Amino acid sequence: MSKVTSKLQVTIPKSLAQQCGIQSGDEIEWAAAADGIRLTPSTIKKASLTIETRLELFDAATLRQKKRQRGRQRLESGDRGWVREALYNRGRSR
């Protein structure tokens, strides 16, 4: 028997998960049934990517990040409109 947590999470008994072929990370579908809830394992499995594909995606993301960083303008320390010394003296009476 399973118990519903405060976050509305449910644990599937191990024997039932093994019987239905449900593993950690699998997606399951919930559907309302006549007088209960129907649980079915999703038939769509995540396709595992090859190392070459993963590296291509990583390289593309790295190029996008570099392009974003090139587009940003760096402010000089004097362009902030304030100086560090002002932080130490504000709101204090001496």
Image (tube, grey):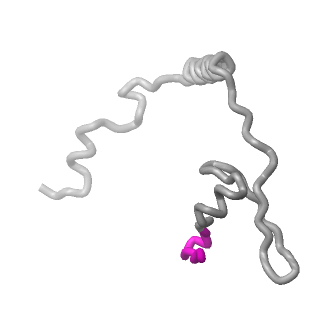
Relative to 9, is 49 on the left or the right? Answer: right
Return the x and y of residue 17 as percentages of the image width and height. 65, 59
Q: Main secondary structure of the magenta part?
A: loop
What span is in magenta?
1-10
Residue located 19% across and 57% down the image:
92
Residue at (82%, 68%) from the top-left corner?
31
Q: Give the quarter of the image for residue 65.
A: top right
Assign the N terminus to one quadrant of the image.
Answer: bottom right
- Residue 49 drawn at (x, y percent): 69, 27
Asked if residue 36 is positioned above or below residue 78 in the image, the reply reads: below
**53 magenta-colored:** no
- Residues 38 and 66: in front is 38
Q: Position of residue 51 (x, y in %)?
A: 63, 20
Asked whether the viewer can see residue 52, the reply is yes
60 versus 83 height, above or below:
above
Task: Determine the image quadrant of residue 76.
Answer: top left
Q: Nearer the viewer, residue 22 or 93?
A: 22
What residue is shown at x 23% (from left), y 39% (from top)? 85
Q: Which residue shows up at 21% across the image and 48% down it?
A: 89
- Where residue 91 sits in the image (x, y, percent)? 25, 57
Q: Residue furthest left?
A: 94
Question: Can residue 71 be seen in this snapshot?
Answer: no
